[in-house]
Amino acid sequence: MPQRTILEVPDPRLRLPATPVEDFDESLKTLVADLIDTLHHSGTAIGLCAPQVADPRRVLVMDLSSRRCEPQVYINPVIQSRARFTFAEESCLSVPGVLVNVWRATRVLVQAQDPTGAPFERELDGLHAVCLQHEMDHFAGKLLVDRMWFLQRLRFNRRLARA
Ligand code: ZN
């Protein structure tokens, strides 16, 4: 399974809204397999979604297992409820080199579909919940850059301008 190239800011494709998956076909299975492979080769990242590899579909994968062998796949996820908010420190493969504090729910109830199209519902806690919300931000074209405080964003933009 080939890895895919991860887009980084300021690539405009990261800002496009994602589209719902309607066809649970071979191309979707390939995408899911490639996302998992790319995530597992990315170092320590715990989540990745299709828009980060220039595919507009609403597909995300997470793996928080210590041996990185228990990937979870969420297609067309919708959060039904959020609770227990706190600040969580997040990083992003598409916004390299920064940590940003984001106000997140640490308990969510999510409905989604698996790669065959079968619907499921799951309650997520802690980092699982935070990661899901982070990846779903990508579906709306929203990035950690938008969550930075003013000075942090200023420093980040300066660094981008120098690159
Ligand atoms: Zn991200």
Image (cartoon, rainbow, N blue to C red):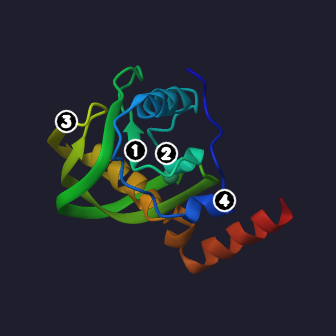
Task: Point out the frontmost of discs 4 and 3.
Answer: 3
Disc 3 crowd, CA 10 A, few/some/many (<14, 14-19, 20+)? few
Asked if one can make out residue 3 in the rendered structure from this viewpoint, the answer is yes
C-alpha separation, residue under disc 2 versus residue under disc 4 = 15 Å
Residue 84, how many percent across, how many down?
18, 61
Rendered position, 140 above or below 48 = below
Earlier sequence position, callout 4 versus callout 1 = 4
Q: Nearer the viewer, residue 125 or 28?
A: 28
Question: Residue 9 shows which numbered tag?
Answer: 4
Rendered position, 51 above or below 35 = below
Earlier sequence position, callout 1 versus callout 3 = 1
Residue under pointer 3 = 118
Residue at disc 2, secondary structure: helix
Q: Amino acid at mark 2?
A: Ala
C-alpha separation, residue under disc 3 versus residue under disc 2 = 19 Å
Residue 115, how many percent across, how many down?
31, 32
